[in-house]
């Protein structure tokens, strides 16, 4: 499958890129010019910004799916609005090109209808929104853009993300208090959604796999 990856130079995005290539996918990575990325077989690098609708349309050409592992660079209203604009450019380009599958990295603090969060996690989300208002706002705006389309989207919402090797993950509609998940497991979950059809037009939480 030919996959467009956005955010391929980020901490999770780099792991998404490696997993997608390891799984045999052809990857197009849209990156800022200042973000170097090693060239290799089955990887095409496109320099540009998601703020440029023409660049987004060109990067999307011949792709079958998109993984958006984007995030704001800073906790500012400018970056909050920029992520919304980028997602509008992306979804419009996907609809015009007939590319239906979108997998997005979201976050546990993003509010989704029907959420089931423990009270303390609800409180934590309030605190995160207060102290990282525009970071959460950016991801909330992003979610509201793609969830309003007719695209076949899935948004994965990890709680606290930590370093470490993969230990296995599970996707669930119920957040577990105090859960932590490795970046590698989040990246694997994002790539796995290219073929996993269970969570279409849904935003499950990414939690560590249960241990016996």
Image (cartoon, rainbow, N blue to C red):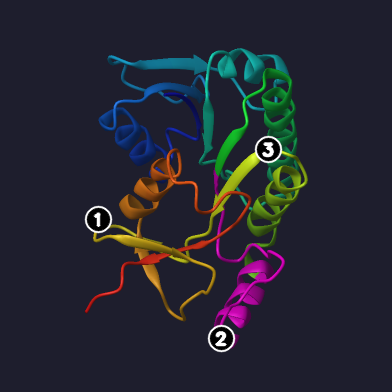
Label 1 – label 2 distance at C-alpha: 26 Å
At horizontal 75% and vertical 44% (from top left) the residue drawn is 145
Magenta segment range?
Answer: 104-130
Q: Residues within 10 Å of mark 3 (few under 14, many from 20)?
A: some
| In the rendered image, the vertical position of residue 86 relative to residue 34, given as above or below | below
Q: Mark 1 points at which residue?
A: 166
| Number of marks in the rendered image | 3
Q: Is residue 173 left or right of residue 201?
A: left
Label 3 – label 2 distance at C-alpha: 33 Å
Q: Mark 3 points at which residue?
A: 151
Coordinates of residue 112 in the picture (x, y in percent): 68, 64
Q: SS for tag 1?
A: loop
Mark number displayed over residue 120: 2
Q: SS for tag 3?
A: loop
| In the rendered image, the vertical position of residue 90 relative to residue 114, given as above or below | above
Of residues 53 and 200, the one drawn nearer to the viewer in this rendering: 200
């Amino acid at each position: 499958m030919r996959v467009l990856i956005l955010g391929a130079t980020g901490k999770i995005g780099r792991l998404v890129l490696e997993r997608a290539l390891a799984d045999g996918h052809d990857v197009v990575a849209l990156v800022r010019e200042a973000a170097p990325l090693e060239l290799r077989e089955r990887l095409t690098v496109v320099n540009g910004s998601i703020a440029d609708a023409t660049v987004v349309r060109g990067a999307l050409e011949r792709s079958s799916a998109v993984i958006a592992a984007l995030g704001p660079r800073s906790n500012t209203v400018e970056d909050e609005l920029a992520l919304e604009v980028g997602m509008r450019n992306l979804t419009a380009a996907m609809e015009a090109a007939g590319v239906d599958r979108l997998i997005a990295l979201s976050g546990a603090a993003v509010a989704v209808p029907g959420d089931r969060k423990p009270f303390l996690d609800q409180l934590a989300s309030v605190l995160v929104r207060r102290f990282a208002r525009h970071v959460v706002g950016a991801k909330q705006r992003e979610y509201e853009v793609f969830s309003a389309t007719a695209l076949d989207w899935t948004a994965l919402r990890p709680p606290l993300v930590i370093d470490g090797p993969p230990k296995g993950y599970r996707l669930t509609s119920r957040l577990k208090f105090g859960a932590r998940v490795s970046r590698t497991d989040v990246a694997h979950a994002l790539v796995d959604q290219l073929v996993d059809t269970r969570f279409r037009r849904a935003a499950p939480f990414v939690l560590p796999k249960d241990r016996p």
